[in-house]
Image (cartoon, helix red, strand yellow):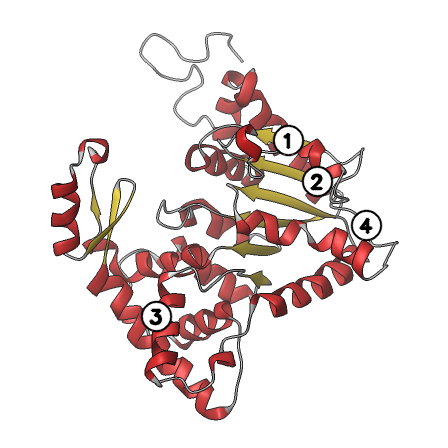
């Protein structure tokens, strides 16, 4: 390959068909860029050795349309389980059915309180530079999922939050409302594979708030119709124990918060609280985050701190990429997918 990767006209010397991987290998040589390469190579190495990858997703990755790359990762078997926030669970579906009604606000840093009030008056809920339309997204999905909550409630059935979403997506009820190519919905891809999923703290989400409201109003009689976070941890313990008895399991963390904190704790819980001393540690760890360790931020803790909590081992491959996950994650996925 020519050392002048791009010629003076901005073209690759071998033509226009340069892969993402080739571009990254040539340009991403130092600092966080080099960490990205190391983490991507470690990801591939784990999979090639027969290992599996557990992905955690915080932040607003669904509204950032991470499904454009994550859905294909799921379809190709590069992701084997997911923990996400309730917001990411629902916002992928909001985007699926209401994308044409979303509005981008590129000058969001300049908005005044009056500007924000005007967005509220129009029922446009802002996530950084993107406004989610309440009526077309949130209320449309509420109407569909409420029927499932009430049906399960009347039948004495109990499901996890993601199972309700899987059921709705696989039923085809929303198919006529799709406003993006469904191949770009990561949750639909997960539903089609019945991917193991864990959604701790689901009540801290729009649909979680709506569910509480419908329980208060009496539309749902049994608050336990939607299963709880403790039950999610019990399911995760079973999943982790069974999976790691057969193959190494890596941990790929996008952003911080409960999506990462909740699942990584399963190992010390199994070791210390259940006395299962022979359960393996996580076999790989990577976190994409711009948080720092200042003021005791757990989300910004360096991977070695997790050794002291019995989550990672001395020899566990560890990577931290201090950058924007909306930039970094798609590039790593492209590398893993061979794009």
Q: Residues within 10 Å of mark 1 (few under 14, many from 20)?
A: some
Mark 3 vs mark 2, CA separation in Å: 37 Å
* Circle 1: element type: loop
Q: Circle 2 sits on which residue?
A: 284
* Circle 2: element type: strand
User: Residue 239 versus residue 270: which sits nearer the camera?
Assistant: 270
Mark 4 vs mark 2, CA separation in Å: 11 Å
User: Residue 220 versus residue 2: which sits nearer the camera?
Assistant: 220
Rendered-image quadrant of the N terminus: top right
Q: Nearer the viewer, mark 3 or mark 2?
A: 3
Q: Nearer the viewer, mark 4 or mark 3?
A: 3
Mark 1 vs mark 3, CA separation in Å: 36 Å
- The spot of residue 26 in percent (x, y) is 53, 17
Q: Earlier in the sequence, mark 3 or mark 2?
A: 3
Q: Earlier in the sequence, mark 4 or mark 3?
A: 3
Q: Earlier in the sequence, mark 1 or mark 3?
A: 3
Mark 4 vs mark 3, CA separation in Å: 39 Å
Q: Circle 1 sits on which residue?
A: 302
* Circle 4: element type: loop
Q: Circle 3 sits on which residue?
A: 210
- Whether residue 244 is visible here, answered yes or no, is yes
* Circle 3: element type: helix
Identify the residue at image location x=38%, y=73%. Answer: 211
Identify the residue at image location x=50%, y=32%. Answer: 291
In the drawing, what numbered circle is on residue 280?
A: 4
Q: Residues within 10 Å of mark 2 (few under 14, many from 20)?
A: many
| Image: 122 above or below 297 | below
């Amino acid at each position: 390959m020519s050392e002048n990767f791009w010629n003076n006209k901005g073209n690759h010397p071998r033509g226009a068909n340069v892969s993402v991987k080739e571009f990254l290998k040539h340009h991403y040589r130092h600092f966080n860029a080099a960490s990205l390469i190391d983490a991507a190579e470690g990801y591939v190495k784990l999979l090639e050795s027969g290992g599996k990858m557990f992905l955690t997703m915080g932040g607003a990755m669904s509204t950032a349309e991470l499904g454009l790359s994550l859905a294909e990762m799921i379809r190709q078997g590069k992701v084997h389980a997911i923990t996400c926030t309730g917001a990411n669970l629902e916002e992928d579906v909001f985007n699926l059915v209401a994308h044409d009604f979303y509005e981008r606000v590129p000058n969001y840093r300049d908005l005044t309180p009056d500007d924000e009030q005007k967005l509220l008056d129009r029922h446009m809920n802002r996530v950084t530079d993107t406004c989610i339309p309440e009526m077309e997204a949130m209320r449309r999905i509420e109407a569909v999922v409420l029927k499932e909550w009430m049906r399960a409630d009347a039948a004495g059935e109990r499901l996890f939050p993601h199972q309700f979403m899987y059921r709705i997506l696989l039923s085809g009820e929303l198919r006529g409302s799709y406003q993006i190519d469904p191949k770009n919905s990561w949750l639909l891809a997960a539903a089609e594979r019945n991917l193991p999923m864990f959604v701790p703290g689901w009540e801290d989400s729009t649909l979680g708030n709506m569910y509480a409201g419908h329980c208060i109003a009496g539309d749902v009689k049994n608050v336990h119709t939607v299963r709880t976070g403790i039950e999610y941890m019990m399911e995760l313990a079973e999943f982790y124990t069974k999976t790691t008895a057969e193959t190494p399991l890596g941990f790929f963390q996008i952003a911080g918060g409960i999506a990462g904190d909740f699942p990584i704790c399963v190992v010390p819980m199994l070791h210390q609280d259940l006395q299962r001393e022979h359960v393996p540690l996580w076999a790989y760890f990577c976190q994409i985050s711009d948080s720092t360790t200042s003021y005791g931020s757990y989300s910004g803790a360096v991977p070695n701190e997790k050794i002291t909590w019995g989550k990672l081992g001395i020899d566990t491959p560890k990577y931290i990429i201090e950058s924007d996950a909306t930039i970094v994650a798609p590039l790593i996925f492209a590398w893993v997918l061979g794009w």
